[in-house]
Image (cartoon, rainbow, N blue to C red):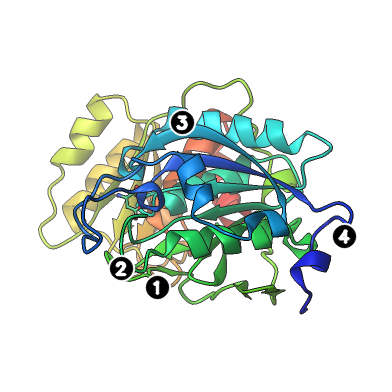
Amino acid sequence: MKTSSSMSGHGSALRLPQVVLLATGGTIAGYAADAGRTATYQAGALNIETLLAAVPGLTDVARMRSEQVAQIDSKDMTCALWLTLAERVNAVLAEPDVDGVVITHGTDTLEETAYFLHLTVKSNKPVVMTAAMRPATALSADGPLNLLNAVRVAAHPEAAGQGVLVVVNHQIHCARDVVKTSTYSVQAFQSPEIGVLGWVQDEWVELQRRALRRHTVQSEFDVAGRHALPMVEVLSSYANASTVPVEALVSAGVRGLVVAGTGNGSLYGPLQQALADAARQGVRVVRASRTGAGHVMRNGAAADDTLGFVSAGNLQPYKARVLAMLALAHDMPTDRWQSLFEVY
Ligand code: ASP
């Protein structure tokens, strides 16, 4: 669909959509003393007012309100902050006058936060996350246009009911599938195999696909009132992989282990044995793949039924961890675990 921005939002020409911006820091709020610097800078240094001031035309797209929820480098994201963020998004979207939310975030853990919110936000209103690969002070900073595009998408009626969307470098991704795939490129985000949901350029917002897996209002995960999540860690398999991390984590009381296996989630023999021992002791073991794309088939490269494992399907290991933490937080019975990885 092509619509001009003045007509594309929820409101008429008399009432622009109301979009609330929740800022958390990241490179989009990054500062370096020298405009030529794109690798050494302080992430999360600038506040939301400074970011908004760099985006002319924003108030022609939406009525904006903003809130600084955090000011961090997203490498330091915590489960506690995820819970706070989910609570703020849910509270803001429950306001009748609010049409959508935009969240600014660092790129490093963007995909994890996006999937966490995808499963825990309880609203059909648009939730759009954005970020930047270059600090706000850099030549050709990508943040201001990403922010404008994120607001354009959040103000668009077609963005409703799609779960959490990630808008970066003109592309619109589904939170479930998007991953950061480059350390420096402004085209860092991809949704491997599945592809983007749509794109945004100037006043054109176009969504060409819908996410079919469960999210937001169809999700059974509700984190209201929670202050912590169960311990789930990620390991990987490789030539001659040690079993020491598994044993140490089990002694530390880990509740779930996601293993990024080789290929189709295959595991180095001794590591597989250590994980089977952990599963026998009640630790939930999820087999994902370190390849970055493709499915891990149940009972494919490992005998999940016998070993007590769950296969992650095509969910990336760090997102499988998010789903595992939520499943543990909700005391999901063992026999439901495999189906969770098939519907979310
Ligand atoms: N380290 C930064 C962060 O995740 C990187 C970025 O935002 O691009 O906050």
**Image x and y of residue 242, in percent:** 12, 48
Residue type at numbered disc 2: Ser
Residue under label 4:
13
Kind of residue indicated by mark 4: Ala
Question: If the image is split into quadrants, where does the N terminus sit?
Answer: bottom right
Q: Considering only order in the chain, which callout, 4 or 3, is on the residue closer to the N terminus?
A: 4
* Residue marked by disc 2: 182
Marks 3 and 2: in contact by CB < 8 Å? no
Marks 1 and 3: which is nearer the front? 1
Horizontal and vertical percent position of residue 64: 67, 45
Tag 3, which secondary structure? helix
Give the image location of residue 113, x and y in percent.
Answer: 48, 45
Q: What number is the disc on residue 81?
A: 3
For the residues labelled 1 and 3, the Cα–Cα distance comes to 27 Å
Mark nearer the N terminus (4 vs 1)? 4
Which residue does the numbered mark 1 point to in the structure image? 187
Please name the residue shown 30% across and 68% down the image. 182
